[in-house]
Image: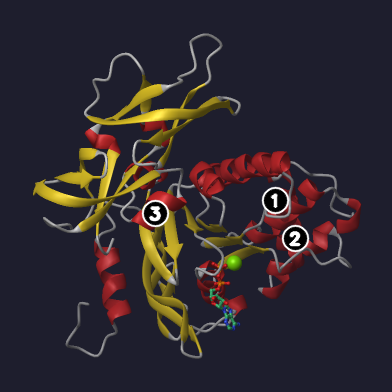
Amino acid sequence: MFRDSTTRSAGEVAADQAAAALPQGRPVKLRINGVSRKYGDAFALRPSDLDIEQGEFVTLLGPSGSGKTTLLMMIAGLVHPTSGEIWIDGRKATRQQPYERDVGMMFQSYALFPHMTVGENIAFPLKMRRASDAAIRTAVEDVLEQIKLPHIRNRFPSELSGGQQQRVALARSIVHRPSVVLMDEPLAALDKSLRAHMQLEIRQLQQQLGITVLYVTHDQEEAMTMSDRICLMNEARIEQVATPAELYFSPRTVFAAGFVGESNSFDGEIVSTDGAQALVRTPFGQITGRLMGAGSKGARCKVMVRPEAVSCSSVDASGQNMIAGEVLSHVIAGAIARTYVRTRDGQACVATDLTRRTGDAPSGQVVMSFRIEDTLVYGDGS
Ligand SMILES: Nc1ncnc2c1ncn2[C@@H]1O[C@H](COP(=O)(O)OP(=O)(O)O)[C@@H](O)[C@H]1O
Ligand SMILES: [Mg+2]
């Protein structure tokens, strides 16, 4: 890491560098600089860096226990970091109290106050920041318009539907116009259709008002649907930060390829490499793919291919990579049809296609083919 010879911290230097970079990009609203948290000897979050620009929607995505909530709680000021600095809108917030920080919160554990009306709930962050009664009244009215619920100010949370409660919680998180809004699995308790609806609503409001959001979910589809960028987390560290498309088409690690979307995975050995490509020996012949990260001749590797990149054919087989196999079953799963194939050495593979009314389902002996650019090769250690 870069070290400055003066007494200034790495975080201050980094903030200056970000400010210097302003003309090209948007201002950095949130900077996580070497932030970690330990409980006893175990890291809940290893030292991590992340910048979020003004107006961005960034999602922390990862399995349960990967450190997402810990990071959010540190930004909110509810958990103290073991190391590192947190910058909010150019100000060092690491040692600020939660109410001093310029953040809004929509947490599962921070539900609406049942004994307060909707208006009082929404006014809460403004009261904590000692806003005047007049300012509070105007701000609450404005935000109720924004969430399209102008007439519920005097109701109690128990008198609202689940979706309305979520919208009130959203209103409470943005009413004081915070620099960053933090949301921890805010839709986890909702049923599927309401959740899909609220995803769109939150995203639309965020874009319309230009709000900066750091969102947490373990649901990859939710992350892909809502985010400008996804910060993928695994085992207390950041695995990859990328746009949804980058993460899907160029996952940097085997974990990333497996966690986001579906993948077929084969073991192999690297025969040779040529720039960004690798030739791999597998139990069913040689395959060429894109080398993701390090990998040298003779190294063990994993080959990953998305099911929709695989086509099954009994007639022509003219793909760049080909594997022979036998169809086990063909299933119409809705918009997508899935073909399960067993390779000659007994490995299970799946190919997906859009479901069509006409056309024969693949059966019997087939050849699965897929393109080099859709074939990802991960050397040992990735
Ligand atoms: N207060 C705590 N005391 C001890 N361990 C904790 C505490 N909070 C979180 N952890 C541990 O830190 C890790 C990350 O937890 P968390 O940030 O809640 O993960 P996530 O939100 O991704 O599910 C887990 O292994 C969890 O058990
Ligand atoms: Mg969590």
Q: Residue at x 12, y 49 (%)?
A: 271
Cα gap from disc 3 to disc 1, whole angstroms:
38 Å
Which amino acid does the dot numbered 2 rest on?
Answer: Ile
Labels 1 and 2 touching (C-beta < 8 A) = yes
Q: Which mark is residue 89?
A: none
Q: Residue at x 52, y 49 (%)?
A: 220
In the structure shown, which secondary structural element does the residue marked by tag 1 occupy?
A: helix
The residue at which mark 2 appears reads as 122
Q: Quadrant of ligand 2?
A: bottom right
In the foreground, 237 or 111: 237
Examine the rendering and report whether any part of residue 94 can be seen.
Answer: no
Residue 85: x and y, percent? Answer: 40, 79
Labels 3 and 1 touching (C-beta < 8 A) = no
In the structure shown, which secondary structural element does the residue marked by tag 2 occupy?
A: helix
Q: Which comes sooner in the sequence, label 2 or label 3?
A: 2
The residue at which mark 1 appears reads as 143
Cα gap from disc 1 to disc 2, whole angstroms:
9 Å
